Amino acid sequence: MPPKTFYITTPIYYVNDVPHIGHAYTTVAADAVARYRRLKGDRVLFLTGTDEHGQKVEKAAEASGLSPQEFVDNVCRRFRELWQQLNISNDDFIKTTEERHKKAVTAIWETVAKKGDIFLGEYEDWYCTSDESFLTEIQLVDGKCPDCGRAVEKLKEESYFFRLSKYGALLLKHIEENPSFIQPVSKRNEIVSFLKEGLRDLSVSRTTFKWGLPVPGDARHVIYVWFDALTNYLTAAGYPDNKDGWWPADLHLIGKDILRFHTVYWPAFLLSAGLPLPKKVFAHGWWTVDGNKMSKSRGNVVDPGALAGKYGVDAFRYFLLREMPFGADGDFSEKALISRINSELANDLGNLLSRSLTMIDKYRAGVVPPPAPEKDRGLEADLKSLLKALPAEYSSAMDGIGFYDALQKVWAVVREMNAYVDKAAPWKEKDEETLSNVLYTLSEGLRIVSVYVYPFMPDAAGKMSASLGVELPKSFEETEFGKGEAGRKTTKIPSLFPRIQ
Ligand code: MSP
């Protein structure tokens, strides 16, 4: 059987601004899913990229004195460098100024237009440039954008419209028939109520600025940046040439602020173009910083590169996915990060590895001894049954995008292993075979744990396995207890996660 394919995406990030913790959050999450899927044996396409058109970017370029293309290329580089630093394993990186993307956007526009779903009219209402979203008078809050609180501008211009109103009922039906299409459930409910209010047609072109893709056949108009941006998911899947490409996506990971674009506009465009809908859209929550909203004006924007540099890439990745359930909001503080590093990474995991390696070194000259299952006691049996239960629990958490739960399960094992060392007390053990059995059990437990840790902390997982004398994990098939061979040389390594004072 050919391997299952799994196509996962992050939003493509606006290049009017440098990367912050919000961008890193979605991307690290997507990376964990991609690595998890590869370990399961899936063939994965993991896509991220940058959203380079639109009025907001045009304005930012103008302010910087560079041409829009130079400007977007510069900021795009910052994103690419950050992803490299954070060990992101994306298979493709899309820039919406690329030729392949122009081709895809033109093709889907033409298909939708041919279907009769695009018409010329006049737009007269409000626009939020910061969110690049259209708003009605009643949506405004104190005359400002209801989502970001910034000033809005009145637009009155000729515009092409997409017949969004035609697709409300179909979308509702799709959501009802596919309960996991929008996750978490609270977000699905939000969209269902929104759809039940009825949809207005959507303005999909602008004439008052230039930085975008031209409407096919009418170059006075620039295609609405969200119509352009959302199509990136198709572009990278090989649309329109490659009919058997990667589409539909298995998972779009997004933040909660861009839910409507991904679960109303995007599926409506796809329905109109006669294309299948993505299988799942998962919206995560937002980070505040020390209890405050993160914003440039507050000057509290969290720089992911600086944090990863200071505390370590893996520690930062771990913290992001461990601090709160994906889907919930959470608060970032260095204090919370340090506390997780010290207790869970240094004390629990790092310590378990170093004390195990030290004992294998001391009692067996750094060679993994053979197991002696006949020497198993209640202690070993308990630990083995925990390890045996882990794959199913971990997979079910990860399949539901439950990083928090998955890590909790792994850490329950890590803590149990530390307790096991205390109970087994190898330093007191007089029976050589029992001692060998304990040391083998520890090396196996650690080898297995390293596989589960890998999607979150690939570098630490690599160091763990190297110190245990095995290769970097390639598949979950390696997580069976007993698959690790005796006789391997282990190597003591500097502490995996040094304590932070
Ligand atoms: N360009 C659009 C996406 C187009 S996708 C076809 C865009 N870009 S963005 O750069 O503004 O934001 C990207 C992501 O960052 C969003 O998913 C958003 O939720 C996330 N975050 C921005 N601030 C955030 C926090 N404070 N916390 C968590 N994520 C946040 O929108």
Image: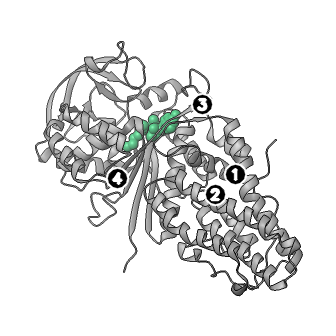
Q: Residue at coordinates 79% horizontally, 48% vertically from top-left? A: 499
Instruction: Residue under label 3, please give it.
Output: 289
Residue 140 vs 489, above or below: the answer is above
Q: Residue at coordinates 75% horizontally, 62% vertically from top-left? A: 352
Secondary structure at numbered mark 2 = helix
Disc with the residue nearer the chain's start (1 vs 2): 1
Secondary structure at numbered mark 4 = loop
**Marks 1 and 2 in Cβ contact (< 8 Å):** yes
Give left or right: position of 398 versus 180. right
Instruction: Residue under label 4, please give it.
Output: 280
Residue 158 vs 325, above or below: the answer is above
Amino acid type, residue under disc 3 in the picture: Val
Secondary structure at numbered mark 1 = helix
**Marks 2 and 3 in Cβ contact (< 8 Å):** no
Residue found farthest to the top: 142
Inter-mark Cα distance, 1 to 2: 8 Å
Inter-mark Cα distance, 2 to 3: 26 Å
Q: Nearer the viewer, residue 247 or 500?
A: 500
Inter-mark Cα distance, 2 to 4: 28 Å
Instruction: Residue under label 1, please give it.
Output: 344
Amino acid type, residue under disc 4 in the picture: Lys
Residue 273, position as x, y percentages in the image: 19, 51
Residue 42 in view = yes
Give left or right: position of 180 versus 466. left
Inter-mark Cα distance, 3 to 4: 29 Å
Inter-mark Cα distance, 1 to 3: 22 Å
Q: Nearer the viewer, residue 245 or 481?
A: 481
Instruction: Residue under label 2, please give it.
Output: 411
